[in-house]
Amino acid sequence: MKRILITLAAACITLCAFAQNFPAGMRSELVEIEQDENEYSVFSYKDNDGTTGYYMSLGTVIPILEVIGDNSSSSLSHIDETCLYMGETEEDALAFLDSLLELVDQEAGAVAKFPCRMTFGAESLGESSTATCMVVSRFLQTKRLSFIFSSGGHTAQADLTKSAIRSLRAGVVTYQRLHPKR
């Protein structure tokens, strides 16, 4: 029993040490949610020049092939993703999420543009771009933010509701409480 506790303590210390200084070109997730087949996350990203920024990932899942069997199912999907720049600190990220909550409260048709970065694939962020956001009100649904961005050779769209923004904000606040700055 003592050996197991020592092994777990060593693994935890190693994990904490690694989490403090993650390598360039890699994401460090703070929170991730899924809503209406779209994936949203807030993460920090370190560029090759050493600067760190916080981003909100807008991912739209496009099912390509789905195989359903008797006891299981599997699918092959493609994710169009762009990442909105939120700022350099966790406080900037919270302020950005608060501004999105204020934007949802505006009249339908209000438009805003946000700086973003496109993805290269798995973890890397690529070139800078701009994502357009419009407040929309769909029939029998609450108002939401509809983000439109270019991905590859086509245009993708991701809708974000007020409840999803609140969930992301609560996740960032929880992350701050669990990982206080020293």
Image: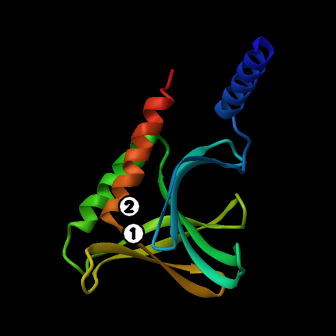
SS at badge 2: helix
- Does residue 153 appear anywhere in the picture? yes
Q: In the rendered view, would you say 164 is above or below 46? A: below
Q: Name the kind of residue labelled 1 in the image.
A: Leu
Q: Position of residue 101 (x, y in %)?
A: 28, 59
Q: Which sits in the foreground, 44 or 129?
A: 44
Q: Residue at x 70, y 59 (%)?
A: 124
Q: Residue at x 38, y 49 (%)?
A: 169
Horizontal side, residue 35 vs residue 103: left or right:
right
Q: Which sits in the foreground, 103 or 169?
A: 169
* Measured Cα–Cα span from mark 2 to mark 1: 6 Å
Residue pointed to by mark 1: 160
Q: Which sits in the foreground, 24 or 41?
A: 41
Horizontal side, residue 50 vs residue 55: left or right:
right
Could you say which quadrant of the image residue 18 lies in? top right
Q: Name the kind of residue labelled 2 in the image.
A: Ala
Rendering colour mode: rainbow
Furthest residue toward front = 70
Residue pointed to by mark 2: 164
Q: In the rendered view, would you say 112 is above or below 31? A: below
Q: Residues within 10 Å of mark 2 (few under 14, many from 20)?
A: some
Horizontal side, residue 165 vs residue 106: left or right:
right
Q: Residue at x 72, y 67 (%)?
A: 121
CB within 8 Å, label 2 to label 1: yes
Q: In the rendered view, would you say 28 is above or below 140? A: above
